[in-house]
Image (cartoon, grey):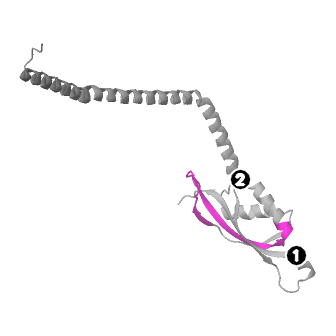
């Protein structure tokens, strides 16, 4: 019934196994690698289409971006109007004098500014002028003065404040409730030419 001899059967099995091995290797090295390459190309195409869609949306939103940029530049311009300009020391003296007119705050000393690079993020073309001021006032008057100063000049910052009684022991009647203060204030300034 069986027309193949034992040797022929071994040859047929060997040829079948070799053919199967060759087909498997061909699939792994050519077809499967091609499928992986095709999958990678499809993923890149999908990513490209996604980036393209994002770019289209950004292009459509360009007028809105330009409007927001113009508004931001306008707000920055308003802030820059309250920044120290020109002679920074004279600017600070004038600000303190104008702000203290309605309060009983007396400044004894306004030290010359110390300039340092700004720590703003992102990098901006400003540096920081640090002032040390001292004087006397009542607690209530000084608090109201500081509140008005910070509201009028939002870029001006109080960094350190030391308060102590104006006199120790028995004060004169006009010295009752007075405090001696020393404050450290900073304000951004456009970078000076060096």
Q: Nearer the viewer, residue 160 or 101?
A: 160
Crowd around label 1: few <14 · some 14–19 · many ≥20 (10 Å): some
Left or right: residue 75 compared with residue 33: right
Q: Which of 53 and 131 is in front in this view?
A: 53
Mark 1 vs mark 2, CA separation in Å: 33 Å
Q: Mark on residue 157?
A: none
Residue 77 spot, x, y in % from top left? 67, 46
The residue segment tinted magenta is 114-142
Residue 154 image-quadrant placement: bottom right
Q: Name the residue under label 1.
A: 177
Instruction: Decide whether residue 128 is among the magenta residues.
Output: yes
Q: Mark 2 points at which residue?
A: 82
Residue 125 spot, x, y in % from top left? 57, 53
Residue 131 spot, x, y in % from top left? 67, 67
Crowd around label 2: few <14 · some 14–19 · many ≥20 (10 Å): some
Residue 100 appears in the picture as rendered:
no
């Amino acid at each position: 019934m069986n027309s193949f001899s034992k040797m022929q059967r071994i040859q047929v099995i060997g040829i079948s196994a070799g053919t199967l091995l060759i087909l498997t290797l061909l699939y792994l090295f050519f077809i499967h690698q091609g499928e992986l390459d095709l999958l990678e190309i499809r993923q890149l195409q999908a990513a490209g289409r996604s980036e393209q869609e994002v770019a289209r949306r950004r292009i459509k939103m360009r007028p809105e971006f330009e409007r927001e940029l113009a508004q931001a530049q306008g707000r920055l311009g308003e802030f820059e109007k309250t920044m120290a300009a020109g002679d920074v020391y004279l600017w600070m003296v004038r600000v303190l004098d104008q702000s203290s007119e309605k309060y009983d705050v007396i400044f004894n000393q306004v030290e010359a500014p110390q300039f340092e690079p700004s720590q703003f993020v992102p990098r901006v073309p400003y540096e920081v002028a640090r002032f040390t001021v001292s004087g006397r006032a009542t607690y209530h008057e000084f608090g109201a003065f500081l509140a008005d100063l910070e509201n009028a000049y939002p870029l001006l910052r109080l960094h350190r404040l030391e308060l102590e009684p104006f006199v120790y022991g028995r004060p004169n009647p006009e010295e009752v409730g007075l405090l001696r203060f020393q404050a450290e204030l900073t304000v951004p300034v456009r970078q000076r030419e060096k």
